[in-house]
Image (tube, rainbow, N blue to C red):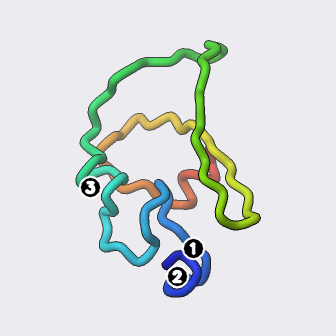
Amino acid sequence: MQWSQNGGKCGICGDAYNAKEPRPHEAGGEFGRGIITRHYFAGQVSEIIELILKFFERTMEPSLLFRSFLHSLLTIDWVKRG
């Protein structure tokens, strides 16, 4: 679907690009409930494990974002600001 219907685009949190906003993993979506499960501090080291099933030769750039307003819609401009 990502390539056949959405021209290779995906939602900010990995959901289908053509899904109705808020998408399931975005703030206000089914899973984006604003529940904070852990706090991290600047400079803190944390082990992160990713499981990626690679079907196509594409790149992925994971990032962690500081969110001071958990219930507002995340935009691509906000993500690029980092």
Mark 1, Cα crowd under 10 Å, few <14 / some 14-19 / many 20+, is some
Q: What residue type is labelled 2?
A: Asn
Quadrant the C terminus occupies:
top right
Query: What label does residue 55 carry, if any?
Result: none
Secondary structure at badge 2 equals loop
In this view, the residue in front, 82 or 40, is: 40
Q: Which amino acid does label 3 sit on?
A: Gly
Estimate the x, y position of residue 2 in percent, counting from the top left. 53, 75
Q: How far is the residue under mark 2 from the one under mark 1? A: 5 Å
Estimate the x, y position of residue 70 in percent, counting from the top left. 33, 40
Q: Name the residue under label 1.
A: 9
> Do residues under tags 3 and 1 come within 8 Å of each other at their CB atoms?
no
Residue displayed at 68% across by 49% down: 61
Upstream in the sequence, badge 3 or badge 1?
A: 1
Q: Name the residue under label 3.
A: 29
Secondary structure at badge 3 equals loop
Q: Mark 2 points at which residue?
A: 6
Q: How many marks?
A: 3
